Structures are given as structure tokens and as C-alpha cells.
Image (cartoon, helix red, strand yellow):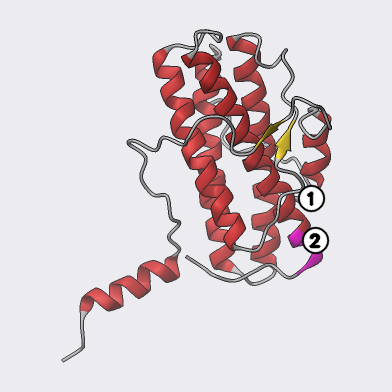
Amino acid sequence: MHNGRMNDTRDANGLVALITIEAALVTVIGVARERAEAGDLDLAVDEIDVLRAAQCQDEAHYHLLRALGAVPATEVFAIAESTLGGREPLLRFVLALKEIATGAGMALARAQAGAGEPPLAETIFAMGAIEAGHATLLRRMLGQSPPNDRAFLPWRFTEAADALVVLAETGLLDVTPDAVAFPGPLPRDCRGVAGLVPQTTEDALRWRDITAGPKS
């Protein structure tokens, strides 16, 4: 894993946006899982399993961004009852957050590639690929056919920081008395999930050199 930090102000603001989105996803999915387990949200067993794994992966993204120096704009989120009032509103809301995350990641990866930081660009791309996979699974749950309906992700943001404005429009950043603190009510459950630490080309080459042993 690349241990560098993003020093450009725009990149730092982009990190703030992305880590806030990841924290929001972990928290929203945690509340949804709690309600589903209590029988207050009608999700199928396999749907809960997908959300459980996605929550684990989103929290891995959160901790990676923390390691890069990112601090969320907030870690307390206002989750509207309308979002949690049924299966379809919940899945559509999580899908919208995933699409914001992929757009922010695309903008931030571009910035890092332009700044000559290929390991960071590679890591952010790897995060975005997982988020896009989640979005495809959510579209399938919502009955979209085909759920993988694009050859390329749509462009969303000139700078990743712009995603924070869109996140605020969801209402998650509102100050309310019943807002939920990250990481939410349930412990993460990472059963069956691998790859919780990113690996860049530099990491792979370093490991290859170590395992190859000394040259004769």
C-alpha cells in the first residue's frame, strides 16, 4: 500500500468528500441491517448478505482514506425515515450514494494521475471498481435489466470535493436530534470478504523481489 499523503488543497478536499461518503455508507447500511434483522425492513436474506459485505468493504475504504490523512466532514448522519421505510427506497438511496462515490473516485484518481502519483491513482481506482460492483448488484436487486448497463461510468465531477455538495443534498449532513454516529449500530461482519488491504503494482513488485530471494 502506498503510504503517501495528498498535499494539494483540492486533493485534500476531495479526500474529505470521499471519506465522508464512505462513512455515510457504512452507517446507513448498518441501520438498514439492524432494522432488517429486527423484521422492520423487508430485505431478503441474500440482499442482507450483499449489504453486509458492502458495509465491510466500505469501512475498509474508510480506514484506507484515514491512513492517507483524510478526516470526514462529519461522522454523524441524518437518515430520513422515508429512506428506511421500505426495501426499494433503501436500495435506491444506497445506490445513489454508490454513484456519488464512484464519481468522486474518478475525479480524485484523475487528479492523482495528473500529479504523478500512480500508486494513489491505482488505489483509488481499485476502490471505485468495488463501488461500481456494488452499484450493479443494487440495480439487480431493484429489477433493472441488464443491471450492468454501461460500458463506462458516467462523468460526475470536475473535482472530487464537489461530491460533498451532492451528498449534502441527500439530507445526510443535516443536523438532527436522531442522527446516527458512524459506524452505526451493528459491528462489521466481514465473513467471506477478502482483499481488505489494497495492493499496488509497487507492492506486488516488492513482494516478488522478496520471495525471489537473493540472486546467485
Q: Residue furthest left?
A: 216
Q: Are marks 1 and 2 in contact (CB under 8 Å)?
A: yes
Region rendered in magenta: 8-12
Residue depicted at x 59% and y 33%: 184
Q: Secondary structure at mark 1?
A: loop
**Residue 216 falls left or right of residue 11:** left
Residue labelled with disc 1 = 161
Q: Confirm whether the magenta stretch covers residue 9.
A: yes
Are there few (<14), some (14-19), or many (20+) residues within 10 Å of tag 1? many
Type of amino acid under label 1: Ala
The quarter of the picture where the C terminus appears is bottom left
159 or 71: which is nearer to us?
Answer: 71
Tell me: residue 61, above or below residue 44: below
Tell me: residue 124, above or below residue 113: above
Residue depicted at x 51% and y 35%: 55
Residue depicted at x 41% and y 35%: 189
Type of amino acid under label 2: Arg
Q: Residue furthest front?
A: 177
84 or 182: which is nearer to us?
Answer: 182
Q: Confirm whether the magenta stretch covers residue 13.
A: no
Residue 53: name its quadrant. top left
Q: Which mark is residue 10?
A: 2
